[in-house]
Image (tube, grey):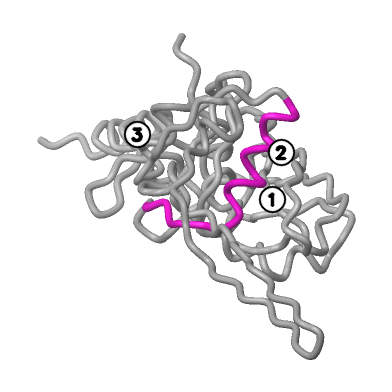
Amino acid sequence: MVNYAALAIIAVLSVAVGFASFDYFTTHTQYRTIEEQVYGKVAVQLAAVDEEDNGLMLPMTVEVKPGSGKVLINIDNPSFILDTQESMRVAVREAAKISRADQSSIDVLFSINGGQAQIVGGPSAGAAMAVAASAAMMNKRLREGVVVSGTIEEGGDIGPVGGLLPKAKAAKSVGTTLFIVPRGQAYQNEPVETCTSEVRPDFRSRYCTVTYKTTSLADVAGIEVKEASTLADALQLAIQEE
């Protein structure tokens, strides 16, 4: 005779054990929920340029806490958020994928010391946000003196950005030792203007031509520069070995 009461108890225990493991599968991908690991807080520097193409650095921290999938922003200038919030969302999605974290069980808080943020908004900080969020989700430490510049795209690719020469110089000024840039951007084509003038009693002229010279970011800034095609590449360079 089948003991249905015993089977019911076994079924309940099986469900309890299943929940205790805190693992579940979606499209055959295994995720970790907040109970499985201690999520962390990571501080980085964002490389940016102002409206006059001067490089500047903005301190940012990324903190991951138990939550319900929110992406939160703490910044003193809301106008910066309009151009940047989509990059933050993509950064968090890609960070959750690569760290195998369950995004629906966590909240991610970006805190940025805005400073001149109203004139440096845009997607170029996306890669740095993704690297910092990934490290926080995995409770990993980043190497000291690492700065990342580049966009973050759906699928984890790091895209090209502008202003890398002034950004590299600004990164050097805050003690950066490794500047990670998108693939193909470690060397920049810098414009060089050459002008000649002719002056006569009744005539004055000035002719200018622009040529381009290839400049090494590493040589200009005096720091190590490495390229990364994907978020995985950048993390391999940026995360501190244990």
Task: Depth check: give the residue in front, 216 or 233.
Answer: 216
Q: Earlier in the sequence, mark 2 or mark 1?
A: 1
Position of 89 compared to 30: left or right? right
Which residue appears at 72% of the width and 70% of the height? 82
Which residue appears at 85% of the width and 55% of the height? 116
Please state which amino acid type lies under the numbered disc 3: Gly
Which residue appears at 67% of the width and 37% of the height? 169
Whether label 3 touches label 1, CB < 8 Å: no
Whether label 2 touches label 1, CB < 8 Å: yes
Q: Of the numbered discs in the image, which one, if any, rests on residue 48?
A: 1
Q: Of the numbered discs in the image, which one, if any, rests on residue 18?
A: 3
User: Which residues fall within the magenta stretch?
Assistant: 157-174
Residue 117, how many percent across, how many down?
Answer: 81, 57
Name the residue carrying label 2. 170
Label 3 or label 2, whichever lies nearer to me, is: 2
Position of 178 compared to 66: left or right? left
